[in-house]
Image (spheres, grey):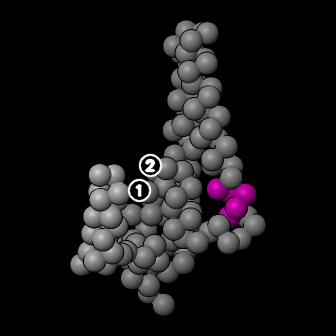
């Protein structure tokens, strides 16, 4: 039964009439939103991961996210709730930084607000 379901899913995806959206065609707002939800995704959509600085930036965002995921519950369980807000603050700063950076890089690359290249 599992093989039949898997086959149906694969065939459905293979013959689906919907075309894929390329990351280069996405608008800066879409890239910023994606990066706000998961830090680093907008940078990858901007192809920022091809440069050394881009790789360092994405790694830093991911490490900050991991640090916030680990720090928040530990501080909340051992201290009172105002101290736990340190972890929440790390989350907020990381997501805002990632989103703003993805938007600025997309605009600098020449992507219009509709998603088409302006060059």
Helix, strand or loop status at disc 1: helix
Can you identify the residue that label 2 sits on?
Answer: 37
At 44% from the left edge and 84% from the top edge, which residue is drawn?
117
Query: What is the number of the mark on residue 33?
Result: 1
Query: What is the number of the mark on residue 42?
Result: none
Image coordinates of residue 27 in percent, x first then y, are: 39, 71
104 lies above or below 87:
below
Image coordinates of residue 69 in percent, x first then y, are: 57, 32
Alpha carbons under labels 1 and 2: distance apart = 6 Å
**Residue most extreme to the bottom:** 119
Image coordinates of residue 52 in percent, x first then y, are: 75, 67
On the question of residue 9 being in view, the answer is no
How busy is the neighbourhood of tag 2: few (under 14 within 10 Å), some, or many (20 plus)? some
Helix, strand or loop status at disc 2: helix
Q: In this view, does 5 lie to the left or right of 72?
A: left
54 lies above or below 17:
above
The segment highlighted magenta reads 54-58
Q: Is the magenta stretch mostly helix, strand or loop?
A: helix
The quadrant where residue 14 appears: bottom left
At 24% from the left edge and 78% from the top edge, which residue is drawn?
17
């Amino acid at each position: 039964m599992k093989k039949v379901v898997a086959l149906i899913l694969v065939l459905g995806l293979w013959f689906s009439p919907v075309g894929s959206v390329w990351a280069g065609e996405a608008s800066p707002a879409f890239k910023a939103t994606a990066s706000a939800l998961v830090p680093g995704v907008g940078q990858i959509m901007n192809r920022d991961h091809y440069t050394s600085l881009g790789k360092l930036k994405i790694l830093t965002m991911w490490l900050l996210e991991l640090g916030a995921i680990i720090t928040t519950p530990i501080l909340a369980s051992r201290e009172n709730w105002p101290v736990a807000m340190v972890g929440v603050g790390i989350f907020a700063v990381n997501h805002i930084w990632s989103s703003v950076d993805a938007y600025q890089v997309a605009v600098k690359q020449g992507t219009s607000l509709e998603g088409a290249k302006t060059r």
